[in-house]
Amino acid sequence: MNHETIELYADRSDVTLTSYVLDDSPEILDGRRRGAVLVCPGGGYLGCSDREAEPVALRFAAMGYHAFVLRYSTYYGTFKGGFQAGEMSGKKETMHPAPVRDIARAFLTIGEHAEEWLVDMDKITICGFSAGAHNCAMYSVYWDTPLITDFFGKGEEHFRPAAAILAYGISDYRLLYSSHPDRFVRELRTASAMALLGTAEPGDELLDEVSPVLRVSDSTPPTFIWATSEDRLVPAENSISMAAALARAGVPYEMHLFESGMHGLSLADRSTGGNMMMIDSDAAQWIGLAERWLEKRMACALPSTPAWMEEMQQ
Amino acid sequence: MNHETIELYADRSDVTLTSYVLDDSPEILDGRRRGAVLVCPGGGYLGCSDREAEPVALRFAAMGYHAFVLRYSTYYGTFKGGFQAGEMSGKKETMHPAPVRDIARAFLTIGEHAEEWLVDMDKITICGFSAGAHNCAMYSVYWDTPLITDFFGKGEEHFRPAAAILAYGISDYRLLYSSHPDRFVRELRTASAMALLGTAEPGDELLDEVSPVLRVSDSTPPTFIWATSEDRLVPAENSISMAAALARAGVPYEMHLFESGMHGLSLADRSTGGNMMMIDSDAAQWIGLAERWLEKRMACALPSTPAWMEEMQQ
């Protein structure tokens, strides 16, 4: 395994790409290229959660894909749990569109190493959780637009995602600005808005711009969506709206909404649950469903028999 | 993740321990120690197969355990597929008891780093495939005997395995010396005997010494066994005999013998199968069964609620 952390800006240490690149072996793929999954953890654009980073990358690596964790631009740069919405101010460096461009930056960096790492650039799936799922959904709808291509001065062929996996994600920012009875939820949403949008009171135009559900098109990649209908922090309506938008655009999608389970379950098993509330054997089924869904578009073509058997038959 | 390869002898580079040590995070275990799985690939004691190394370690790492791959003493040191039984001679350095002592050496090395890596030394499972399963079964019955303790001059508390997973393993060398219609199988067995025993015609005493099935006792760890009843290279009778020996000794065990599937399936999925013959969705169920079995003895005790929730309630 090639495991290293690469800083994606020359003058910043907060945005990093961590590789979990599988060793090649003559006994396995023998030089053939593999697909990869790029994981974007959640954290309300305040930080990137460890619970949605390395353990998830390892799960995809165990499926036989190269895996990467992208720690994209967030307000605090690290995930510390706490925040003070009242003390926050707009931070140009990390607010929209920096996070979505960081995914593009990751594509370029993986592309630079594709030959060395044996990555099949036509099979890169983006997988995000919560705010990370929002960032992935944003990338799904912006990857071939000037926001990305003009900014980097490169053609869309450098940036095309093969598929997207969105876990309890935000797809429609307008939904988040309905009133909510819980003060903690209201404050977290305000802090998250300050982090991504630089204002606690974004206007309609800005809300539309960061609501991927409004921009789904036939260039949006096939998408796997899951959430829990009990989620109080990010309502599952975000997922339902996204599925409806994909359906309208004729984009292949799959969606699993589990009846119970809180926000932020990640893999919902012992690899990511630091306490029993985060372990949920129902919701934990999502990764197996995603594995089968991924295989349809990410699997490497394999010979029917081992090489030594073919040699014997010649 | 701490990923490094440590050479276990000062003057040899063929025996190595490769770590897949999970990052600690305040969001997950917050300083608590995890169990670990030590993976011993197969390869007929001629080499160690990549197909039963990194991909398997990653599968255990994805469950939330630290994982290690041990490349123990083998005749060629590397796995190259081919062998010439007629040209082999006894190699003291790599033959029995070197391979089983290498597992003990790995325990000592992990122990030296246990504090740094946050390893729970009371929860180390050994997991072997084919010849690697033989080596693990050997360790299961020899870990607390002078062959290990006197040799290293250390008490048995340094070497205790919590559990063993044996995949299509050899447990009774006497079974391998029955006649076999296939010339390739006969030659491979001869080569493997030269590698482990230094002779193509081992006597009864030596065969007994390397047949773990004869030495199971109440200090043998709980054992998970799986194989395929079609296996032509290592008959599943090896697994059945081992289960019977564990039953007689009152050692907890679990066994799954799948009806079909060839020898050497490893995870039997795309992460380890370089061709379609090595992919078998029936046999591939073993790792899920092993995961549940492991959880009973390897899981880390977790709080019922997140720390932040406890703080709010105070």
Image (spheres, coloured by chain):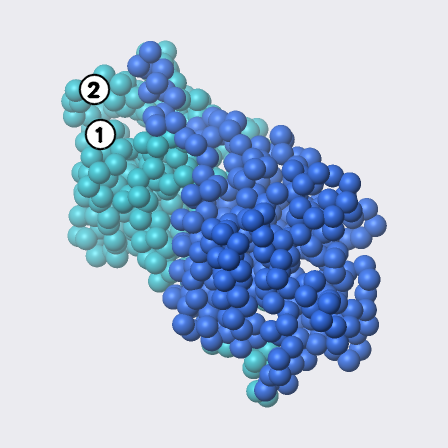
Chain colours: A blue, B cyan
Relative horizontal placement of residue A302, taking residue A126 as reference (left or right) = left
For mark 2, name the chain. B
Residue A142 appearing in the image: yes
Q: Residue A72 vs residue B123: left or right?
A: right
Query: Where residue A55 appears, x then y in whole percent?
Result: 53, 55
Q: Quarter holding the C terminus of chain B? A: bottom right
Name the residue beneath numbered marker 2: B182
In the displayed structure, B151 sits above or below A131; it is: above
Chain of the residue that carries numbered disc 1 in the rendered image? B
Instruction: Give the spatial CA distance, label 1 vs label 2.
Output: 9 Å
Query: Mark 2 or mark 1, which is nearer the start of the sequence?
Result: 2
Counting from the top left corner in percent of width and height, residue B114 is at 55, 54
At x 50%, y 62%, the residue is A244
User: Where's residue B138, x and y in %?
Assistant: 32, 40
Secondary structure beneath dot 2 equals: loop
Q: Is residue B131 visible?
A: no
Determine which of the numbered discs, if any, sits on residue A283 in the image.
Answer: none
Along the viewing direction, whichever of B191 and A88 lies nearer the viewer: A88
* Residues behind callouts 1 and 2 on a single chain: yes
Q: Say which residue appears at 55% left-offset and 68% top-offset.
A: A238
Location of mark 1 (residue): B232
Rendered image quadrant of residue B19 = top right
Residue B177 against residue B136 in the figure, above or below? above
Classify mark 1: helix, strand or loop: loop
Residue depicted at x 58% and y 47%: A219
Residue A222 on image: x %, y %: 51, 50
Nearest the camera: A191 or B16? A191
In this rendering, position of residue A286 left or right of residue A232? left
At a point 38% along the width and 45% down the height, the residue shown is B127
Circle 2 Cα neighbour tier, 10 Å, few/some/many (<14 / 14–19 / ≥20): few
A125 is higher (above) or lower (below) than B190: below
Task: Check whether the beta carbons of the residues at disc 1 and disc 2 lie within 8 A of each other.
Answer: yes
